[in-house]
Structures are given as structure tokens and as C-alpha cells.
Image: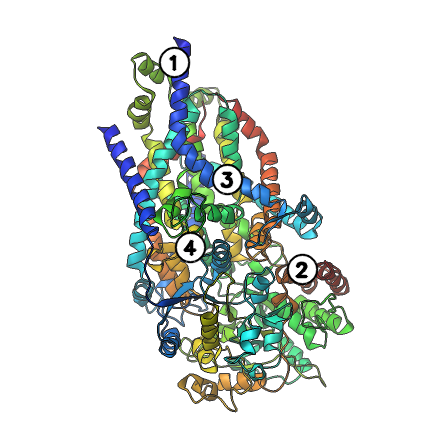
Amino acid sequence: MKSKLLRSEMRAAFLFLIPVFVLYIIFVVSPAITTVYLSFTQFSGFDKPTWIGFENYHRVIGDPQTQKTLFNTLYFTAGTVFLSIISSLLLAVLLNQPLKGRALYRTIIYLPVVAPMLAVAFVWKFMFDPSPSGLINYLASMFGIEAKQWLSDTRLAMPCVILVSVWKVLGYNMVIFLAGLQGIPSQIYEAAEIDGAGFFQKFFNITIPLLKPVTTFVFITSTINAFQAFEQIYGMTSGGPANSTYTLAYLIYVKGFRSLKFGEASALAVILVLVVLMFSMFYIKDVAKEK
Amino acid sequence: MRNSSSFSVVLVYLVIVIISIFMILPFVWMVSVSLKPSGRIYEYPPRFIPSPVTFENYRTAWDRANFSRYFMNTTIFAVAGTLLTISFCSLGGYVFAKLRFPGKNILFMVILFTMMLPFFSVLIPLFLIVKNFPLAGGNNLFGKGGIGLINSFAGLILPGIVNGYYIFLFRQFFTMLPDELIQAARIDGCSEFRIFAQIMLPLAKPALATVAIFSFMDKWNALVWPLVVLTDPNKRTLQVGLAIFQGEQLTGAQWNELMAASVISLLPTVLVFLLAQKYFTTGIALTGIKE
Amino acid sequence: MKRRKKLFLGVLSMVFVLGSSLVSSLAIAEEEVVLKIWDTAAPLRDPLREIIFEKFESENPGVKVEFEGIPWAQYMEKIITSIAAGTAPDVIRFGYAPRFASKGMLIPLDEYIHGPDGVDLDEYINGAINASHIWDGKIYGLPHNLVPYGVFYNLDILEENGASIPQTYEEFVDLAKKLTKKDEKGEFTKRGIQISSYAGGDVDYMLLFLLNQGAKDVSVYDHSVKEYTLNSPEALKGLTDLAELYKEGVIIFAENEQPFVTDYTAMWVTQSNDAFMFRPEVYPDFRFAFSLLPAPEGREPVLAGVCRDSAFIPVTTNKKDLAWKLCKAYASKEATALLYQGKYGTLPPFNDILDDPPATPAYLPYQQDPFLRQLSSIVTSGKEMISPLQHWHMDGEEIGNILGEELGFAVRGLKDPQQALEDITKRINQILQK
């Protein structure tokens, strides 16, 4: 009886998956495999790819630009992921309290998520103008902070790009955390309060541990997205100033669509995936263990 | 005791209000610039409320950029694409969550791997696959001779339908639903498809709404793929029209006209978000949590 | 009920999808020859372009020109994918011809240029074709524009300070320092110079300071060039000056015209067609002037810039001869003047813009508008135009990147200028000698 059920389950799985997988194999898996193949070739996008083995990888790994780009990417990813997790968690906790108008605040905080990144990147670039009439400088001057060159300053440009990236994704992560918080039964907090626990104790001893599954999910998706971040750099800095905001995703684009070197670009893409895999190994293992 | 708690309430409100201002600032600036006449975009000190206010930019943007047509094209694309996406991805997510079959974990790893590749590295392979699609657009059985699915509605939406991220999302959600429901239905003699369609899917309304909104947003904001795959100007989508409207850096639209065009194109996604807010926030919520 | 609805929706979508792909595969009968051309998207219905097409169609009966505008920022993706798929048009109007040509994507135009329906190359400003449109000794496009690098001056600020337009480099530097001001708190209220950094363009303008001293980036404008020769005492002087000016706060980098039109910066080192941003229609009261970067005492100013735009022909076309005719029509004096009429500050790349221009309305502004007159006389003064290596070499992207990084560090005081020049030479030579 059991094996009959199992077989019909497997048959159903097979049938259900066919339409999904046909589309998936054609439009998602094939391009991915082709990219891996192209990483071993020299390909201008137009001519026939010629096989050159690991030459792209040698060239890419030996190039000082790649090393700098990798550093920038890790800087960007670490900054974006940690800042967005901490701030969205904080906001979720705050907006989980019975505050007046919290629905409105949640909506406002979510708003950046729905806007196209390229468009808002231009707006931010506009606001970061180095002259005193640039909006950010103008607002800063009201707090006594002198006008800065922001996107032209090699030390400030990456923090600005990180800021915009966090701004964009904050609302999304906040909502995920909000749901996670709502899944923690209030009795646990009440019991802790009876034992005399204050706000911070409740937060660190109850909230954080119980939120772990949510936090790791947010961590992994934010990491993948951060590694692939492109439009904010394209729209705000073009990788500058002096390559200080040049990230891997941007390099892949430029190597492919500006230098017409798709073989190298594909090798860089494969390297990117390997780095992301390294970062997210533990979470993927968690997910795989499930069921 | 009372003093410190009201102080902390004030502090909480302060933090939330400051962050909300930070989130909404670029949008306020966008609208402000869109209402400014040319020549008054840059002023010192910068002004939020322009004087004089002009709506000319919106009129120009709407007329010159042929928005009505692009709105229609994009609506069809986004709605049809979204319907297909939620159908296919819910099916896929359900299979990975609830049905047992050999190789399930490996298949899921493949899906995760493809999620990590940046878009620009698969653009050319995907494009060539679409172009060489057999028996379409004048192609023979081997996919040669014609233009395949290029410039077709199918070519536009098919690649985006099966998306690893949404399958993952649905999978997380379905994992949370109790197996007992399924087992009971099986004992009652229900077919696997009926279990999916009539029992599980209705319970998945929040996930459906969530993916629907995300997918709608993705397709509404899509730029590069519609630009590359559509060759008929009449089939253009909104973001493509907007990009063309922006034109070269040095010609065509001024910042104010560009901001007006951007505000127009932003409205539908904001509207969809506002209307579906309730589904949305309860929706994504549940995907992060694991059992 | 729900299931039936889902099935219905699913079937409907499938029918829709299959149906549309069937329809798109139906062949469309054509009676006339259609020539397709792409151009960077300026206003969708550009009346000036239509004038050129109308003229072309009347001169070539039976031919229809089909135009499509492509967004500049995504043009590379569009071109590459279309040539790869064979859906490219017959003519593409863009820049970077050598890059595409080096990958075998374009048709060389030499036999057409020197043929019966050809073009006289002597009419072009010295250097216009050489650096920007040649690969492996062959010409792939005729230049449509010329955009020199130079300095814009905010005349109101200059007059307020009793200054006039500097004639030498030394005067220029002194003026820049004089016009940089701080308030009581030590914060800058005015800066002398802004350098354009839009889309990585600051490379070109930093380089300009070095070329201005007499440095040369390469010795031949030929893709066979194997040595980058920027490292010289002249280049070191230019770079050291830049670093010093930056350190004193005289120079800032800026993405657009905002600091300039809000009277924060007095002078703007950029390309001449940035004048479009503060053209009279938009800023009627803004008074400005333009000159090449003033040269050191005893030297001539360097005419550096780009002539990047041209119309080129993808190899995938089957209408080569007609495509050439359209290229030629686009490259005519009248057409180029028409095309760039709206792009205030761009010049047609011909020798006789002022002296013997075509008697057409398109050329009137070049004779009447004071800024355009000034610009034209600067350019047609007989100098050879220099286009920096990163603009025409097939590896230009990497080269420009190296320059941008090293020069950027040196100017900001993050690296020793001599070391930067040595590293530039080493890294670029590696690319050139591959």
C-alpha cells in the first residue's frame, strides 16, 4: 500500500515537473551551462567560440584589476548585507510594537523596493552632487557638516553605493523579519518578563535565537543579490572613482559588453558563483538537510 | 519607570521618522524636480517646492515618449507573465516541498546554482537559444534559418516564467503546510493534482499573492531583455520607452522631463503595492520561516 | 470550479503564446527594398533625421529607410546580440567602430570610399578619421562629429574678480587658485576648476593636462602600436600640477553642470558639447566662453578630443551597396550639421566649417552663434586632432580603466605621480604587447 502511494507520488512529481522543467532546462539551465562552456573559450559574441582551456582563468586570476574588484565586491557585500540585516531587524522590532501609524511607516519604508534600481540610482547620483547645492550636501550643511565630494571621493564612493543598496532593500528584509517576529509566541516574552528580563535581555536571549531561520534566509538572499549588484554602480559611479566601486558583476558586464571578451566574462561569472557558494555553503547545507 | 518608558517611546518614534524621511527623500526630490521648469533645476539653495510649479514636463513626457502604447504593451506582458509564473512556479515549489522522488536534492542544488549567475553572463547564450528555437519564426527543425522567438511575445515572456527564486519561495511556503492534510486526502483517494489544486493551492494564497506582486514588479521594471528581444518599436515596453526617452546623455530630455517620465512609470507598481499591501506583508513573511 | 478556472487560464495562456509565435513566423511579402538603420535614441520623431531620410529616399526610388532609436546606455547589448543573431540592421550609427571591427563584425569601407561614388578624405580635419575609425589599416566609418576637449569659463565669475580669459597655462593655474575661496570656517565657497567625471570621463581630462605639457601617449595612431609613451618629464609635470591643485582644493570632480551653473566652480574642463547642458534656451542669462586648455608659455595648445560617431555596416547585411549610400548620405556636410544642430557644442568634422560652408540653414548657427564660431575657429586652425589611445584601440576599455585608476590615485595624492606613470606604462604595455 505504501509503495503504491509512493509510486503514484513519484509519478505525479514527474508529470508536474515536466512543464516546469522543460521551460527551466531550455531557458535557464542551458544558458547557464553554455556560460560555463564559454568560460573555456575565446568568444567575441559574434565569432565562433574557440576552445582555449583554462587560459581565461589564468589571465583573470593574474590580473590586478580582478583582485581589486574582488576586494571591492567583498567590501560591498559585507557592508550591504550586515547593514541591511541589522537595520531591517531593528526596524522590524520597532514596527512590531503597537505604535500609531505603523502601517503608514511600513509602507513608506517598503517604497524603495518597488522602484527600478537604475532610475533611482540616477536620482541618488543627482542628490550626491559635490557642490553645496547638491541635496545631500545642503542637508548636511544644516547639521554643520561641510560639503563633501561623495561619489568622487575614493573613500566615500563605496559607502554611498552601499547606502543606496541598503536603502533599496531595507523594506523587503524588514517585512520578512516582521513576519518572523510575529511567529514568536508572546507567552515566551511574558514568561521572561516575569523573570525580570528587560528589553535587551529579551532581544538577545529570545528574539535573536528564535529568529535564526529567518535571519539565515535573509542573509543568503541578500548575499546573492549583493554579489550580483549592477545597476546602482552603472547608474551612480561607473565603477569609479579610480575603480573604488568596481565590483565583480560590473566587471562581468564590462568585459562582455564593452570589451567584447565573453570568454573572460564567463570565467569571471563562474568565479563569482564559486565565491557565492563559499559564502553560503552552510545555509545551503541547512536547506538541503530539510526533508 | 514611567519617565523612562515614555522617553523610549519618543526615541523609537524619532528613529522611525528619521528612517522614513531617508526612505522617501529621493521620491520627494523626483516629484519636486519633475515639477520644475528647465533652467531652474539647479538652484542654490535647493528648493523642494518649486516656484513656479509646472506640469509641462508630464505632458511632454506622455506625448513624446508614446507612453500610452508602451503602458498597454507592458500591462499585457506583466499580467500574462505573472499568471504563467505563479502557475508554473507554484507547481515546481510544491513538488520540491511535498513530493518525494529520487534526485530531488541534486535538482534543487542545480536550481540554486543557476540563481547565482549574474544576468549579463547568461544574456548572450539565452538570446541565442531564443533565436535558434526550432520550428519558430521561420526556423527549421534544427533551429536554423529564421529568427526563432525573437520579437515575439513568447520570446519575451517564456524565459522569465520559471524562476529559481520563486520556486524557492513557494517551496519554503509549502514546507510549512502540514503533511497530514495531504496524507488524509490521499487516503480519501484524491489524485495528486487535485490535492495540489484544490487543497494546497487555496492555502497558499499569501504566497501566490506575494509571488504575483514580485513577478509583476519584475516584469514591469524589466529593461534589458525586452530591449534586446523585441525588434518592433510598437511592441516596446515602458522601461524601454523610458530609456529611449532619456536618450543620449547630451540630447533629448532634461532632468525634469526625465523625472516626470520616471514618476509616471513608477505609479503602477506603487499602486499595485498599495492595493495588495495586506496580502503582501503577510505573504513574504511566511517564506522565511522554516519549521 | 477553481480548478476549471485554472485550467482555462492555463490553456488560454498557452494558446496565446503559441499563437503569437506562429503569427510572427509568417513571412511578410515586401515590394520595396527596406534599409534598416539604428541610431542612438534622441527624440523619437526626430524631424532632422527625417529630412535626411526623405532626401535619401527621393534620390533612391524604391528604397525605404526604416529607423529605430536605441537607448545609448544599452546600445552595446543591443548591437552585439543582434549581430550574433543576424537580426542586425543594415547600418548602425554609433561609435567605437574599431572595437567592433577588430572582432570581424563590420565591413571595411575603403573600396567604397575610393570608388566612383566615394568621398574625399582630405575634407576632414587632420586626425579625425585616423584615430577613431580605423582598424588594421582599413576604414570602417566616416566621422560625423568632432568634440574637442577644453575649458568653459563662467564669465560672470571672471568679471566679478576682474579677470580675463587666461592665455597661457601659467595664467590659467594662477586664476584657478585665485578663484578658489574659503569662508571663515575654512570651508570652500568657490572652486577654481571642475573636471568632468561623467561615466569615467575624468580620464580624458586628467590626460589633457599631461598632453598639454607636451607628453604623448603613443607615437603612432595605428593598432600596431606596441609602446605606451606617456611616461615623460612633461607628463610628470602635468600630473604633479594636478595633484597639487587637487590638494589645495582648487579642483573638484563633478558629474554634471550643477556646480558650474550654480556659480560654485569658475572653470570647467570637459568636452565642448557639454555646453548643451547650459545652452541659451535653458539658461538664457548664463554667460560663458570656451577655449582649448591654455598651453604653457611658448607652446601651442593641444587639440585633443573625440570624433567617435559614425555610421558603419555590419557584416550580416545583404544590401552592402545601398548601405554604403546611406552611410555616405549620413556623412555629408549637410547631414552632419543637421544631426548635431541640437547638440550644442558638437562640430561637423570638416575643414571648411567657417570659410566655405554649404549654404544651408543647417550651417547658419556655426556662423552666427558666438560660441560655435569660437569653437569652429579653434578647431579649424590647422592643428592635428589627437584622440587618446583608449578611444580607438580595441582594448580601449581596459586601457582607459588603467589610466583612470592610476591617474585618479595620483591626482588625489594617494600615489606618487612618478610611480603612477611607471605603473601605467607597465600595465598598458602588457596589453599592447600581447
C-alpha gap between disc 4 and disc 2 = 31 Å
Residue B176 in view of the camera: no
Q: Chain of mark 1?
A: A
- The amino acid type of the residue labelled 1 equals Leu
Helix or strand or loop: what does disc 2 sit on? helix
Question: Alpha-carbon distance for marks 3 and 4?
Answer: 21 Å
Question: Disc 1 versus disc 3: distance between alpha carbons?
Answer: 34 Å
The subunit letter for the residue under badge 4 reads B
Distance from label 2 to label 3 (Cα)? 35 Å
Q: Judging from the image, what secondary structure is the residue with disc 3 in?
A: helix
- For label 1, the residue is A5
Q: Which mark is residue B227?
A: 4
Q: Amino acid at mark 3?
A: Ser
Three-letter residue code for mark 4: Leu
Contact check, label 1 and label 4, Cβ < 8 Å = no
- In x, y percent, where is residue C309? 52, 71
Q: Quadrant of the N terminus of chain B?
A: top left
Q: Which mark is residue C342?
A: none
Image height of A132 relative to A273, above or below: below
Q: Residue C370: where, in percent of width, then height?
A: 48, 86
Q: Which mark is residue A30?
A: 3
